[in-house]
Amino acid sequence: MNQRYPSVLLENAVNELASLPGIGRKTALRLALYMLRRDVSFAEGFASALVALRKEVRYCTVCHNICDDEMCAICSDPRRDRSLVCVVENIKEVVAIENTGQFRGVYHVLGGIISPMDGIGPNDLEIESLVERVASEVVKEVILALSTTMEGDTTNFFIYRKLAPYHIQVSIIARGVSIGDEIEYADEITLGRSIVNRTNFSDSMKGG
């Protein structure tokens, strides 16, 4: 049964909030009513931040992380080890790994993983730009830190084959993250240990 609202404006707000992932209509209604209880300046600031995010956010020209300038803070930090590149699926994995405090290299954000069922192929991801980084920069090791799913493993193997001609070390995070888990949901201690205790990718295939 469709829920009825006393105001079309309220209903419109609930519909928009409920379109967000993980937000049901009951939660959307609570959020909309919360907005009504706050000052108009709060709603204006909230809306302004979202509009600015959508219109003004940029992507790092090196690693494709979200940033405010041409290059993200991590890539432009001289204290980071640019010879060590950690490959992740999305920006949220960068946040998760940074929160461990265990990684001092740089990142490469693919923008997804290979998933034929979803119509996502290698050309839809930032794989070629990763190969170009390895070819043009002094990269000694690439760490594959993708979700431990079939799609993640497929993407790992594809990248491993693409980087094979460059004879660099390609590692994979230790399987402290359970099979089928996504990196962003791993606790910081487990994720940190998985990065520190990473293994050579070719060795992981032998043990597979």
Image (cartoon, rainbow, N blue to C red):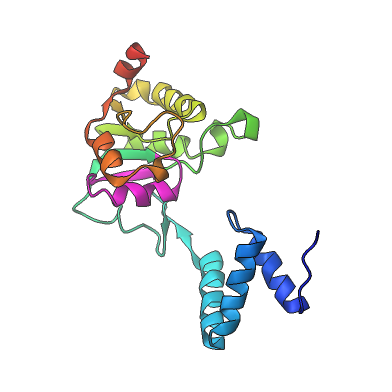
Horizontal side of 57 relative to 202 (left or right) equals right
The residue most toward the right is: 1
Which residue corresponds to the image point at 56% horizontal and 80% vertical from the top-left? 43
Question: Percent position (x, y) of residue 135?
Answer: 34, 33
Where, quadrant-wise, is the C terminus in this rendering? Answer: top left
Quarter occupied by residue 131: top left
Where, quadrant-wise, is the N terminus in this rendering? Answer: bottom right
Horizontal side of 76 relative to 6 (left or right) equals left
Which residue is at the front of the view, 42 or 48? 42
Magenta residue check for 14 = no
Query: Is any part of residue 125 visible from this angle?
Result: yes
Query: Is any part of residue 137 visible from this angle?
Result: no
Which residue corresponds to the image point at 51% horizontal and 35% vertical from the top-left? 113
Quarter occupied by residue 124: top right
Question: Percent position (x, y) of residue 133?
Answer: 36, 39
The total number of labels drawn is 0
Magenta residue check for 96 = yes
The residue most toward the left is: 79
Quarter occupied by residue 207: top left
Magenta-tinted stretch: 88-108
Which residue corresponds to the image point at 50% horizontal and 44% vertical from the top-left? 111
Question: Percent position (x, y) of residue 45?
Answer: 51, 80
Which residue is at the front of the view, 121 or 103? 103
- Identify whether 119 is placed above or below 16: above
Which residue corresponds to the image point at 59% horizontal and 54% vertical from the top-left? 21
